Image (tube, rainbow, N blue to C red):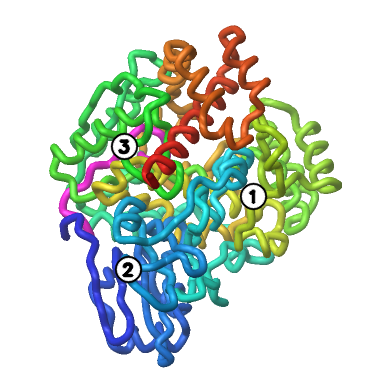
């Protein structure tokens, strides 16, 4: 048991900051032994990728004095570095070396140089939603990808860095539900016993409810916390109550506050654009509740959709055909049809179309963007070898990109450790090796996870297929601030940089009520505009 302070252990030429566990037995890695430090140096970090897991940053120096960094796989602590000769200590002289940091304001105050907002990368961030490659939206700053090993001075990616495709079995294997149950319980239990008091953000959806069940099993000291809206579509309290009542746990219930100001600049400088500014007041309530409880960590079910294989793609049908034959493919098509409330023949037709003409590697949304910075999908080391995975495995693996933008998107993650147990490396690697069509068997999303916890979760949670909606926050906020959004966007920084299609934006803002998808897009662009202005203002 412990508080929320990230531990630091040093041995020999290696240092580990954060929470790590041994792969063998999942016991906490409370200190690095001299033998472990020697292995880290000798293998250039690859030993840690197979022997440890968790949420940590590992640093070591080799015999030549070169320094290396490893960010733990899947959802490790955010880690950034500067380009070339721009990383300099204030007042320093001589050749510059790269410097890793997680707080932009602190790094800038210490004298680490950086550029301003990068229009091409901002365009890419909006055009390829939630795709988070190494190049950030600030000129001169890159992010270390989860699982990546870099050499500090050059910033070059090292061989042996973690990649999802290294864990895709060919052929994939099937797993029993109790095997998944044991693994989820083991990783969640390992996390649960690292902290004295835990607040779990409990929506009553499948994923957070599974985390709650495993926390109760391991004997962790925890409580649930849920936010409710006056709109029934956003009120998830009945599901959250069903879970805590079954487990005999405490549930803190709070009303979701009024949305934030959509044109307000972020309170805190961030290297990358964070979550929706409209949810800033909700973020504050989550944090205040955790602090009132004395929580050493905030747990979340984030990533469960991805890790438990929530796929509406036809790719698993192709995997089933390749690895298990026509009958398995026929069944997989029926499963997808049931999930989509459609028919099997249409699913098979879409699968055939996908086989003949594979879709782009990532969805593209050019709405309200000009053509000035239009370009290919940003580079990411995980996309390089994606073709070595089967289509369904590739969909499963690329869904991990989505998780990077949510775990550390809001300021509460900067104040209290934010832990997503379902994104633990052993569980993710387990899922990457499974038959992709098994996740949807029986026409249920996350079917294997539902079976694994069928005897432990309330019936209404197991049967639940929808999530709480927060459109009741976004739509009125747009209507109330439409007139203020007009000059904010049409005369803003992104407009001046040529990123926006101003005619299309003007038509949207001057038009009628608009559809929810377009309104969310405008608010998304407004968020990015506020972030860009905060970076520009900080450099004055």
Q: Residue at x 43, y 32 (%)?
A: 276
Question: Can residue 310 be seen here?
Answer: no
Q: Which residues are magenta?
A: 194-208
Q: Earlier in the sequence, mark 2 or mark 3?
A: 2
Q: Is residue 205 inside the magenta stretch?
A: yes
Disc 2, SS:
strand
In the depicted view, which residue is nearer to us: 144 or 383? Answer: 144
* Image position of 62 (left or right of 390): left
Whole-angstrom CA distance, mark 2 to mark 3, is 34 Å
In the depicted view, which residue is nearer to us: 81 or 458? Answer: 81
Pinpoint residue 347: horizontal percent, then vertical percent.
76, 35
Is 394 above or below relative to 209? below
Do the residues under discs 3 and 1 have CB atoms within 8 angstroms?
no
Pinpoint residue 1: horizontal percent, then vertical percent.
16, 60
In the depicted view, which residue is nearer to us: 449 or 380? Answer: 380
Which quadrant holds residue 509? top right
Pinpoint residue 65: horizontal percent, then vertical percent.
40, 87
Whole-angstrom CA distance, mark 3 to mark 1, is 36 Å
* Image position of 298 (left or right of 424): left
> Which quarter shows the C terminus?
top left
Residue beneath label 3, please? 267
Residue beneath label 1, please? 395
Q: Is residue 227 inside the magenta stretch?
A: no
Label 3 packing within 10 angstroms: few (<14), some (14-19), many (20+)? few
Disc 1, SS:
helix
Disc 3, SS:
loop
Q: Residue at x 66, y 54 (%)?
A: 394
């Amino acid at each position: 048991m412990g508080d929320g302070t990230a531990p630091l252990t040093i041995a020999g030429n290696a240092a580990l900051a954060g929470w790590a566990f041994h792969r063998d037995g999942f016991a906490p890695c409370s200190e690095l032994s001299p033998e472990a430090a020697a292995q880290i140096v000798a293998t250039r970090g690859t030993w840690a990728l197979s022997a440890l897991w968790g949420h940590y940053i590992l640093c070591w120096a080799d015999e030549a004095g070169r320094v290396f960094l490893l960010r733990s796989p899947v959802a490790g602590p955010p880690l950034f570095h500067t380009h070339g000769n721009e990383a300099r200590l204030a007042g320093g002289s001589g050749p510059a070396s790269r410097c890793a940091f997680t707080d932009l304001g602190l790094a800038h105050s210490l004298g680490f140089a950086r550029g301003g907002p990068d229009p091409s990368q901002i365009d890419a961030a909006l055009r390829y939603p939630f795709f988070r490659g190494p190049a950030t939206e600030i000129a001169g700053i890159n992010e270390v990808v989860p699982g990546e090993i870099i050499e500090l001075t050059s910033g070059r990616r090292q061989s042996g860095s973690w990649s999802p495709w290294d864990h895709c079995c060919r052929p994939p294997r099937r797993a029993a539900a109790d095997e998944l149950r044991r693994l989820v319980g083991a990783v969640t239990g390992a996390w649960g016993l690292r902290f004295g008091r835990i607040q779990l953000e409990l929506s009553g959806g499948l994923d957070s409810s599974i985390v709650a069940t495993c926390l109760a099993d391991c004997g962790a000291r925890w409580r649930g916390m849920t936010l409710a809206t006056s709109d029934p579509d956003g009120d998830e309290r009945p599901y959250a109550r069903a879970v805590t009542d079954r487990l005999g746990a405490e549930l803190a219930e709070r009303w979701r506050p009024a949305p934030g100001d959509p044109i307000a600049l972020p309170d805190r400088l961030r290297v990358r654009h964070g979550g929706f500014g409209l949810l800033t007041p909700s973020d504050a309530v989550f944090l205040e509740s955790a602090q009132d409880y004395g929580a050493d960590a905030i747990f979340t079910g984030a990533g469960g959709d991805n890790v438990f294989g929530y796929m509406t793609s036809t790719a698993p049908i192709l995997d089933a055909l390749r690895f298990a034959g026509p009958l398995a493919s026929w069944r997989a098509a029926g499963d997808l049809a049931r999930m989509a409330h459609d028919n099997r023949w249409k699913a098979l037709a879409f699968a055939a179309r996908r086989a003949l003409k594979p879709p782009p590697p990532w969805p593209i949304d050019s709405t309200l963007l000009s053509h000035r910075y239009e370009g290919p999908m940003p580079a990411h080391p995980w996309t390089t070898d994606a073709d070595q995975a089967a289509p369904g495995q590739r969909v499963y693996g690329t869904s991990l990109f989505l998780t990077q933008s949510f775990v550390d998107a809001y300021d509460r993650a900067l104040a209290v450790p934010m832990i997503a147990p379902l994104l633990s490396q052993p569980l993710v690697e387990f899922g990457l090796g499974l038959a992709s069509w098994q996740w949807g068997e029986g026409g249920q999303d996350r079917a294997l996870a539902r079976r694994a916890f069928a005897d432990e979760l309330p019936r209404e949670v197991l049967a639940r297929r929808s999530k709480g909606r927060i459109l009741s926050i976004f739509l009125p906020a747009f209507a109330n601030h439409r007139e203020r959004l007009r000059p904010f966007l049409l005369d803003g920084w992104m407009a001046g940089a040529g990123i926006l299609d101003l005619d299309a934006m003007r038509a949207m803002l001057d038009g009628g009520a608009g559809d929810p998808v377009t309104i969310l897009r405008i608010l998304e662009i407004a968020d990015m505009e506020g972030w860009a202005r905060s970076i520009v203002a900080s450099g004055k």
